[in-house]
Image (spheres, rainbow, N blue to C red):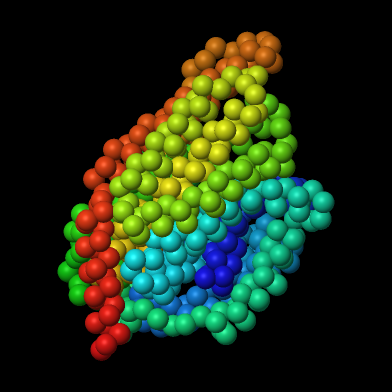
Amino acid sequence: MGVVLMGTFMVILDTTIVNVALPQIGIALGAGSGIEWVVTAYLLAVGLAQPPTGWLADRFGRKRLFIASLALFGVGSLLAALSPNLQLLVASRVVQGLGGGALAPVGMAMIYELFPADRRGTALGIWGVAAMAAPAFGPVIGGYLVTNVSWHWLFLINVPIGALAIVAALRLLRDTGYKERRPFDGVGLGLISIGLVALLLAFSGAGDWGWGSVKTLSLLVAGGLFLALFALWVGRREDALIDLSMFRVPIFTLTLGVIGATVIVQFGILVFLPLQLETVRQLTALQVGTMLVPMAVAGAITFPLGGRITDRIGARVPVVVGSVLLCAAALILSRLEVDSPVSLIETALVLQGFGFGFSMMPNSVTGLNALPGRFVAQATSVRQLNVRVMASFGVALLATILAIKLDGMPTTGTAVAGSAIAQDAYNTVFLTMAFSAALAAVLGLFLPGRERNRQLQADRAAEFSAADTV
């Protein structure tokens, strides 16, 4: 568990640790423009690495893939730290992303398969602590390193940690889980890769280009077309890269919907609350990062608790309760004023942490429990892809709402009035998040309760017992 947590934490940490340091990196490298590709390239590479993860894990084993991914991530980190210009830094971030993209889904699959069916919620809840803590601690660590040490250490810090993780993985990890030697679907990988890149680029640029621009619409159409071609292609193959028959299991598909609605709230707050605090209240990046720590602590408490509750009574109760808490947090943020006390913001963040912790892992473990064991590695990669795409879509949508509200309001000559206008625009963004959380709560009502959960656990236990006997 510790080895998998270490690898997962490193990869997810790198999605946020660099954000606060982009201006300083741009100045150090003499980059007048394009510095945002340091983040964008990493996120795109992570997304591209995830579709083949299921095939690689089934073909070569979870342990080998996990160690290879750690090594590639470490190499990319070292190259990034030594990069003398922006072009090499972006290329190094691609290497990082390709290595790190597989770590989260394969790590999740390993944890799921190492524990008995009635303890998987608790185990995945503990694993989820890394997923919750990393984005919250990223801005704090990044702000400290770039302010007091050097931007190179944003990447160099991964090298010794990664080396230690590889040694520990070689000694401690067991290679368990489903294995199958099926041909590699190169055509399917090409189709889904092009489709994902097009969609992620569209979501990334829609805020600047506009949803009705030629660029955005062209990328959206191209992405949708290639993903449709991918679905047609894999639907006719027995050795498909991703077996779409898993989506015929209603519980699994439902959990993806709930996760998607939840992710919009989580990433929305992680992106837009810091922006609001820095632009409206003029707080520093380090101050904002410190304010996010209680949210991470709250999530660290409720991730294992939500998983344990799911093991006992099913996902319905924790998911609905967690979604309601997320909705309450977003509603509080949507009512803020320029001079609202910081304690009110911290209250909302703690509710956010509790809500996300209660709702996220119960969905994940229930979705996996609803599927036969041969789908586990593929399902974890699909789950991570769902998180990646919905986070990008949600941030793009919320950024568009923010831009519309700011453009549609009259300008004034006073800083106080300008801050009030900006605050009202951000409030609309947070209100939109509240609606997404409410949707997650409604969908959560259809998740399994106690009896159905016991049946799913019994089915999975019997399946793994039969596999062990064989």
Residue drawn at the location 26% of the way across and 58% of the way down: 453
Can the viewer see residue 382? Answer: no
**Residue 165 rendering spot, x and y as whole percentages:** 61, 75
Where 103 falls versus 386 (above or below)? below
Q: Is residue 28 above or below residue 123?
A: above
Apparent side of residue 322 relative to residue 338 in the rendered image (left or right): left
Residue farthest bottom in this picture: 470
- Identity of the residue drawn at 65% across and 24% down: 341
Q: Quadrant of the C terminus?
A: bottom left
From the top left corner, tell me how far across and down residue 445 is, in percent. 26, 42
From this viewpoint, is residue 363 visible? yes
Residue sitting nearer the eye, 239 or 252: 252
Q: Position of residue 405 (x, y in %)?
A: 49, 22
| Residue at 68 percent of width and 42 percent of height | 290
Give the total of numbered labels.
0
Please identify the quarter of the rendering in which residue 120 is found: bottom left
Q: Quadrant of residue 317?
A: top left
- Please give the name of the residue rendered at 51% of the width and 37% of the height, measured from the top-left corner: 351
Residue 114 x, y percent position in the rendering? 41, 75
Residue 404 vs residue 148: left or right? left
Which of the pair 64/302 is nearer the observer?
302
Q: Nearer the viewer, residue 151 or 451?
A: 451
337 relative position to 265: left or right: right
- In depth, the one of 58 and 206 nearer the eye is 58
